[in-house]
Image (cartoon, rainbow, N blue to C red):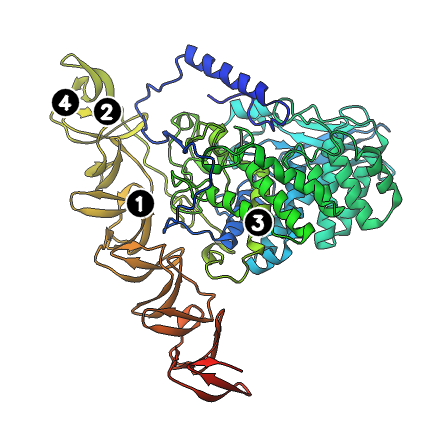
Amino acid sequence: MRMLTRKRSGEKSGKKILSILLALIMIFSVLGMSGSTSLAQSKNGSTIRFGSSREIKDYKYSDISYNYAKLLQYSLYLYDANMCGPNVGSRSLLSWRGNCHTYDKTTYKRKDGKTVNVDVTGGFHDAGDHVKFGITEAYSATLLEMSYYTDKKAYESAGQTKHHRTITDHFNEYLKKCIVSDASGNVEAFVIQVGEGNDDHNTYWGAPEKQAKSSGRKIYFASSKGDYSTDIVSLSSAALALHYMNYSDSSSLTAAKKLFKFAKDNPKATNKTAGSFYESSGWEDDYCLAATLLYNITGDSQYKNEYNKYSNTTKGNNIYWAISWDNVAPLIGYFSKDKTKLKASADVANNYVSNEGYVCLLDWGSARYNTALQYAGLLYDKVSGTSTYRKKSEQQMKFLLGNNSQKQCFVVGYNSYSPKYPHHEAASGYSFSELNQGTHANKYNLIGALVGGPKTDGSYADRADDYVYNEVAIDYNATLVAAAAAIYSGHIGESGQSVDKNLSSSKSQSSSGSSASSYKPPKPTKNQVVKTTYKGVIGWYYVQKGKVVPSFTGIASNSSGWWYVEKGKVTFKKNGIFKGAINGKTAWWYVKNSQITFTDTVAKNENGWWRIKNGMVDFSYTGIAKNEHGWWRIVGGRVDFGYTGVAKNEYGWFRVVGGKVDFSYTGIAKNEYGWWRIVGGKVDFNCNSVEKNEYGWFKLKGGKVDFGFTGIGYNKYGSWYCRGGKVDFSYSGNVYYNGRTYRISGGKVVN
């Protein structure tokens, strides 16, 4: 079962949300739904709690790195996962996403009596669901555009401009398609929503590619007839204006002007269609932001006049709160160079410091507000020319990446401590029944998605059935992207700041981290495991011809899946790797709480640790595979604890010590192919400088020691004379290299 009212901003209605949640919890208890009586019970997803201290602590975890180039790269992928329309297959970088909702079309009868076709295919799904809410659509587009405008160098350095352009083009194309023009070309109506929240949440859970039109995709309009939705229309205008500022797209500027005119010429009111999902507290901030941008672009005084009308209203100047879909007022401070607006927003963090120093404004989606406050502070630093908030912002981001007592990361796929069960239909690959289990493995890796995060009491649970803790959304990731880019801007060129090359351009990624597989777990064929009473004890037993068979040990099935049966009974306590046959295929199967789990991991039995692929030991695999304890060197399906060197998998090449990837290692290590520059456990193929290990200082080329090099190499400490790839500290004298004479003293260039 899913909550009917899901994801509000809560700026002015936090208490109301809390009362709703408490009421629903009581209802669930009355209905007997607080505990599961299903056969497929899971012990994962338990609630963790952070310490009561209000101070940030640096835990110095050796296996957690803070690579902001990678974070920026990963954070964009949520938009590939949530992309909608007829060209998803060609645009999304995720191979498991395809074209969907190609029937998002309707007609509109204009005031002149003419009926026109309206095609609003495209855009992005809001969260883990498939509704397209206008306010988060426009807000997310605005923040992504804003991020590129303020931190273009970060995108260029990380090689993410193309990806950003694809995503924002998709947003802007959709916003333009939402416009219904009259005969003169002016905006008569604007699509503000596709789909209805409650219908979407209660009638379908599954892949958007398979969602039938009959599931409910109603299309809602703002028009001069009513439901003016000044907030959505204005914020859409702002997004389009920013797209023009970033990419000189004149059609976006034209659309931005037309939408602003519609907002100006009609009565002003907030959108009511989204109901309890996204109920704006005002429209003035959106209107003033659009006016500011259009004035900066055109110099037309009409926009300045409109800004002046509303900029001092309570909502138009709501700078004492985090940036969110319900509050973009602080952003105006960047374009007006009014640093006080940004400082006021950033300083909100001081009043909401919770467990372990984590800034937690509200229970629902706390991580999005946290990253929003990070971004506000970093924008202040840009406008003021200071670094007032950089340290604070980085501390908060490090908490979100795992620098906390629970070693919990809140960005999916970023490291081995990331959430495993984000609430997301498309990535899940399962049905409502598995959703209710909470910890059923997702079929696909929702890489880069920011989950809701901890509550104000310091609690968090990694469960798909808890959308307060674990849902993802396009507005959540918008400020993650923005904060990541702004932080990375201060670390460009530093060691350890590099993108994941295996994720840069090609289609990716299944739950295992490799390309999406067509593998489908075998469907249960027989109802062999039944709940019954045997010798006076109620349990789940292996039954043949109506009778319990106590002599049976092996694998059997029922409608909930495949089970390891021991002496005729499912104990729910068996964990490990066990031999058995499924549909005639004999293999060693991965068993968790007595259930065969068709996943990819590394697991152990009495004979060692083994690579599990699709629930089976894969004896053919040699490479590096991961589980919750780390990344492991595998040879012939088995962890090779005797191996120390540099080995590879689909993510890259890694430093391995005693069979395990050592993410704490930075230096130079070797394998049979050469000597390699390692940063945070991984070969840095971008490195072309001089770096050291216990044997000396070496010249790198493409991450590899270039033993054929003789000449001058460079690093942050200076310029060095290298002979045979190694710095010659014994040499002093003159060296002629690349048309120039260098004076060398003790191996270092001194002139």
Q: Would residue 368 be found to the left or right of residue 300 on screen?
A: left
- Residue under label 1, please give it: 629
The reply to whether the C-beta atoms of the residues labelled 3 and 2 are less than 8 Å apart is no
From the viewer's perspective, is 327 left or right of 83? right
Query: Nearer the N terminus, badge 3 or badge 2?
Result: 3
Sequence order check, earlier mark of 2 and 1: 2
The secondary structure type at the circle numbered 3 is: helix
- Label 4 and label 2: CA atoms lie apart by 10 Å
Residue 213, horizontal then vertical, whole percent: 58, 29
Do callouts 4 and 2 mark residues in contact (Cβ within 8 Å)?
no
- Say which residue appears at 80% left-offset and 38% top-offset: 260
Please identify the residue farthest to the left as the structure is shown. 551
Residue at (23%, 24%) from the top-left corner?
528
Q: Which mark is residue 390?
A: 3
Q: In terms of sequence position, does the residue under pointer 4 or pointer 2 come before the other?
A: 2
The amino acid pointed to by label 3 is Arg
* Residue 421 in the image, given as x and y percentages of width and height: 42, 35
Circles 2 and 1: CB atoms closer than 8 Å: no
Spatial CA distance of label 3 from label 4 is 66 Å
Three-letter amino acid code of the residue under disc 4: Val
Q: Position of residue 242 (x, y in %)?
A: 72, 47
Please name the amino acid that badge 2 sits on. Gln
Q: For residue 705, what is the image quadrant? A: bottom left
Write down the residue under mark 4.
549
Residue to which mark 2 is pinned: 528
- Mark earlier in primary sequence (1, 3): 3
Examine the rendered structure and indicate whether residue 661 appears above or below residue 353: below
Most foreground residue, 562 or 458: 458
Q: Is residue 268 visible?
A: yes
Q: Does residue 101 appear anywhere in the picture?
A: no
